[in-house]
Amino acid sequence: MAFYLVKAELKKELSKQLEKFLEENAFINLQPFGRALTFSLLNARVDEANHVVWEEEDYCTPPLAQEREAVLDNYFKNLQAEKVDIGKGWERIKSLPKLFPELK
C-alpha cells in the first residue's frame, strides 16, 4: 500500500455533481477503493492556485489507475500524485480550506 498527495484541477462545470454524489455516498461501494476515495474527496482542500488537493491511499500501478478510470478523470484534469508517508499529505494541507465545507 502507498499514499499519495494528489493535486488536480476540478472541472468547474461538474463541481455541483461531484458534491451531490459525495453527499449521497455514491462512490463508497466501488471496490476496492470506494471508502478511501470517498473519505479523501470529502476532506479534499483547495490550494492557493485553486487546485484541489488530498491524500489518497492506493494499491495500483500506475498510481490511482482504478480511481481515475472510475471517478477521478470524470471530475478532474491534470492530476498529479506525489508519494508521501501516511498522514503527511493531510498534514501539509490541513490549513487549506475544504473543497466542500458543508459536507462531513
Image (tube, rainbow, N blue to C red):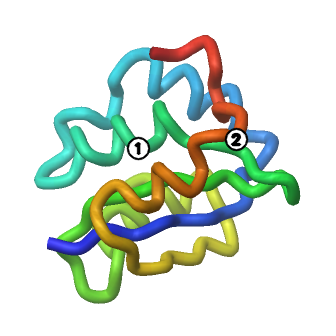
Where is mark 1, residue-wise? Answer: 40
Image x and y of residue 51, in percent = 75, 57
Indicate whether 104 appears above or below 3.
above
- Residue 16, image x, y percentages: 69, 26
- The front one of 53 and 11 is 53
Is residue 2 found left or right of 44 in the rendered image? left
Q: CA distance from mark 1 to mark 2?
A: 14 Å
Mark 1 belongs to which amino acid? Answer: Ser
For the residue carrying disc 1, how many other residues have a C-alpha within 10 Å: few (<14), some (14-19), or many (20+)? some
For label 2, the crowd category at 10 Å Cα-Cα, with few meaning under 14, some 14 to 19 and many 20 or more, is few
Q: In the picture, residue 57 is in which quadrant?
A: bottom left
For the residue pair 102 and 76, the one nearer the viewer reads as 102
Q: Are marks 1 and 2 in contact (CB under 8 Å)?
A: no
Residue 6, position in %: x, y?
52, 65
Q: Which mark identifies residue 84?
A: none
Answer above or below: position of 14 versus 24.
below
Please tell me whether residue 64 is drawn above or below residue 15 in the rendered image: below
On screen, residue 9 versus residue 93, left or right, reads right
Q: Which residue is drawn at the image coordinates 49% and 57% (left, top)?
A: 72
Q: Secondary structure at mark 2?
A: loop
Q: Amino acid at mark 2?
A: Leu
Left or right of 54: which side holds 9? right
Task: Say which label, 1 or 2, has the lower sequence index.
Answer: 1
The image quadrant where one finds the N terminus is: bottom left
- Compared with 4, 60 (above or below) is below
Which mark is in front, 1 or 2? 2
Residue, x 43% and y 53% (percent of image)?
71
Query: What residue would you read off at disc 2?
Result: 96
Kind of element beneath mark 1: helix
Residue lying furthest right in this view?
Answer: 49
